[in-house]
Amino acid sequence: MSLQTIPSDATEHRPNRPEDVQATEAETRLRDDIRLLGRILGDTVRDQEGADVFDLVERIRQTSIRFHRDEDRLARRELEQILDSMSTSETVRIVRAFSYFSHLANIAEDQNNIRQMRARGAAQSGGASGVLAETLAHAKAAGIGADALRAFFKSAMVSPVLTAHPTEVRRKSTMDREMEVAALLDRRERVALTAEEAAASDEQLRREVLTLWQTNLLRRTKLTVLDEVSNGLAFYDYTFLREVPRLVNALEDRLEEGGEAAAGELASFLRMGSWIGGDRDGNPFVTADVMRGTLRLQSSRVMQFYLNELHVLGSELSIAAHLADVSEELRTLAERSPDTSPHRSGEPYRLAVSGIYARLTATAEKLEVEITRRPVGKGRPYESVRELQADLDVLHRSLISNNARVIARGRLRLLRRAVDCFGFHLARLDIRQNSAVHERTIAELMDAANPGMSYLALGEDARISLLTNELRSTRALVSPFVKYSDETMGELNVFHAAAEAHAKFGSDAIPQCIISMCKGMSDMLEVAVLLKEVGLVHPSGRGAINIVPLFETIEDLQASSGIMDRMLSLHDYRRLVDSRGSVQEVMLGYSDSNKDGGFVTSGWELYKAEIGLVDVFERHGVRLRLFHGRGGSVGRGGGPSYDAIIAQPGGAVNGQIRITEQGEIISSKYSNAEVGRNNLEILAAATLEASLLHPRQSAPRREYLSAMDELSNLAFKAYRGLVYETDGFVDYFWSSTVINEIATLNIGSRPASRKKTRAIEDLRAIPWVFSWAQCRLMLPGWYGFGSAVEQWIAEHPQQGMPFLKELYKEWPFFRMLLSNMDMVLAKSSIAIASRYAELVPDEALREQIFGRIRREWHSCIETLLDIMGQDRLLQSNPLLERSVRHRFPYLDPLNHVQVELLKEHRAQNPDEQVLRGIQLTINGISAGLRNTG
């Protein structure tokens, strides 16, 4: 496939600084990689499908460029003629070609990012590189010493939480092949290949691309929850199991370089979390048995990793007793080993490792988790992960005390750190359910226990009184003599499974219970009562699990600090918080608040909610840990993690943060170990910087807050006016997007809507945002901003645009808001969106609504560029600008083909290939845009 669309360097600025030269060299190498992969894909298409298909791909690409560049009407007609003349089978082949180019371009771009990351690291002095090293240097410059940093990390928590939200459209089979292509490119980059090796590498690349071409892009069957769990666990193999321990160890080394006395090992502050297999909100397939299966799969993966590492460690620690001293406790550990091989009789470390291996295998059997390795003899199971850590510590101390520190710092150190980070559970699984389900469950239990009562008829105060009394009661609320509904039994079974998990894997296996759509105090107390029924909350006021409210809508965000103020004032609940170390987690929902009130208002209400919560928690003397429910797309709270954390109001991070990693963002961040390590460093560095280096202030200047309040209100009215108050908007949305067709993709186990209606209110935020991304409008990521600014300036002529420019320059929150809009608008295309609007059969409705959207789109771009001081979108981010520009020639044709296929499908064309073609375009467009849902 031709790469003529990539601009020559002659059109770029002339580099005169080292970093400019480096960037230009990186751009050249990226272009070379894309050309290489494009050429191989083009050859594959020609060989497999014929020259006619290859030529057709080129004609469509070139015509699409003309249409995108200036909405050329002649190009539009020519494009429509080409697409109309194609058969369905030709269309599917064209779609596959453009889709695969997007996937291959992503690989080349990722490799370029790695290349630049390594170049920056090599250029840094002092032996340490990366964003975390830079942040530590800033801390040192600010007078924060190693001991203070150790103290910070002792109570810190940085936790990426993987979710199964269905926005990853790729199959693992294609991801595996793509990772092979990436590995081949990486090897070509790092190794000076001989002519023979280069030829073999080229052939292997062609083999991988051909295999990709002959692999199904789409899943033929729907994923089960346990399939989603298995897919999520793959990223532990790719990245987390090795890179999390390495990162913490590297940070520990960095802190010891300061020359201050080491105060023991650095606390393992980086903790992986998961919702996959524990998130029941709207997913009827997550049951108690599925949750048990999830925990077994997680444990199996980490136990297998430990056993593999011990196996290799045993081969490495061939230290002979007559050549090196060993400690007495190591000798005792070796004597307890069931290994009777005469070949290891004089090798105490190997004997000790064999004994640990045998005990760990017995532990896996006791936990009923599957492993493939078998020990050399029988061992006694470990009662807890602390016992395993104690045995590994014996090895460590013996090596250190006998002048073998360098050996202790090898595989053993990484294994000890891994055990500390992952335990026997691997990831901390959250359980989540909607507050309405908890309410119905409690109502059924209360009404059965108190004949004549109607819990649902009680007011909030009466419910609070009843629930707090129940929390103190030592009797059970559930009766074995009552037949409860299936829903209630299902909920009780899940809580019983959570209690079993605590007994089996330890309390870190399920540390949080999250309440979706939390609207009041009773929602939290209902969960406390359900936890008491299974022993995870005790009548004395002790809790074994964190109760976490999730505030999602605009109204709920506004009420959040008031609710938490009253909760922390409630004696019976406060006892539970104190029993959990006086830490209370609060989750904030970015997705539903955006769908509810629009991008500007959602971002602003989240910010204000944090300010209010910080104030409430400080008054109560309780530590606040915020859990940010961010999606991949800007419309669901996505965007650069570092900027998002730094832009938090003062006191909102405070050393602890949890953030969801969702859908396609998981694979883009964590399928490559080096990229994954960098993303983990970014989270840790931003948490450190936001907590220790930024001046403590609860809010910016009063006039900034006032202006943002007004802008938010104006944007809210514009957004709600379009989405919820315009007659026919629901029909427009369902006709002009692929919302119906997305439901046919086998990309997740959860239904797209909460109820079987077409109402926007009932639609989940993910398909809502995903649909707007597919038609290239990205409406949830910007709508309302342009008209809000215009009206605000009209009402404040004395402040006007100069004041908004000051906001952008001085306020990180406002800067991040606009930066994210800049990114999302750059990926949009009003020309392509106009083609989707034509799918709306009602011409008057189409003209009315799309006309409003088009005007707001232009207004938003004009005001955004003016405030940011840019001539074009992404001017301040040239790397991303080039990336987006390179994609359009291969992305736009997929949109054009999708529109034509949607017409066919909705005209009841019975050909199955039509729907398959639509599904393939969804896959390709998603790959081209990268963060879509």
Image (cartoon, rainbow, N blue to C red):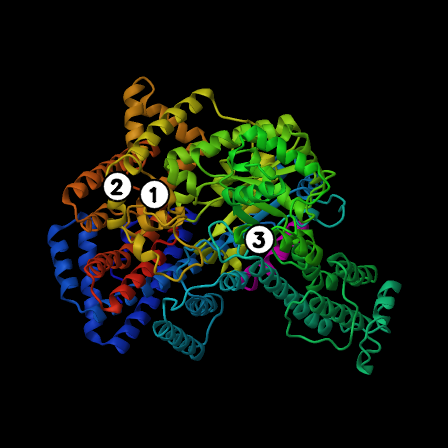
Measured Cα–Cα span from mark 3 to mark 2: 40 Å
Q: Nearer the viewer, residue 635 or 147?
A: 635
Which one is earlier in the sequence, the residue at label 3 or at label 2? 3
| Mark 1: secondary structure | helix
The image shows residue 119 at horizontal and vertical percentages of 49, 55
Query: Which residue is identified by label 1?
Result: 760
Residue kind at label 1, given as amino acid type: Ile
Separation of marks 1 and 3 at Cα, in angstroms: 31 Å
780, 563: nearer the viewer: 563
Few, some or many residues within 10 Å of mark 1 (<14, 14–19, 20+): some
Above-or-below relation of 407 to 261: below
Q: Residue at x 55, y 62 (%)?
A: 233
Return the disc, 1 or 3, that comes first in the chain's sequence. 3
Name the residue located 13 percent from the left edge and 55 percent from the top edge: 75
Quadrant of res 427? bottom right
Q: Which residue is mark 2?
A: 729
- Can residue 805 be spotted in the picture? no
Secondary structure at badge 3 equals helix
Q: In this figure, which residue is indicated by the disc labeled 3?
A: 489
* Residue 599 disc label: none
Residue stretch in magenta: 236-253
Which element carries disc 2, helix, strand or loop?
helix
Q: In this orientation, which residue lies closer to the viewer: 123 or 100? A: 100
How far across and down, in percent of the image, does residue 722 sit?
Answer: 28, 36
Residue 243 counted in the magenta span: yes
Q: Residue furthest front?
A: 452
In front: label 1 or label 3: 3
Within 10 angstroms of label 2, few (less than 14), some, or many (20 or more) residues?
A: some
Q: Residue at x 34, y 43 (%)?
A: 760
Q: Position of residue 428 (x, y in %)?
A: 61, 53
Name the residue located 86 percent from the left edge and 63 percent from the top edge. Answer: 329
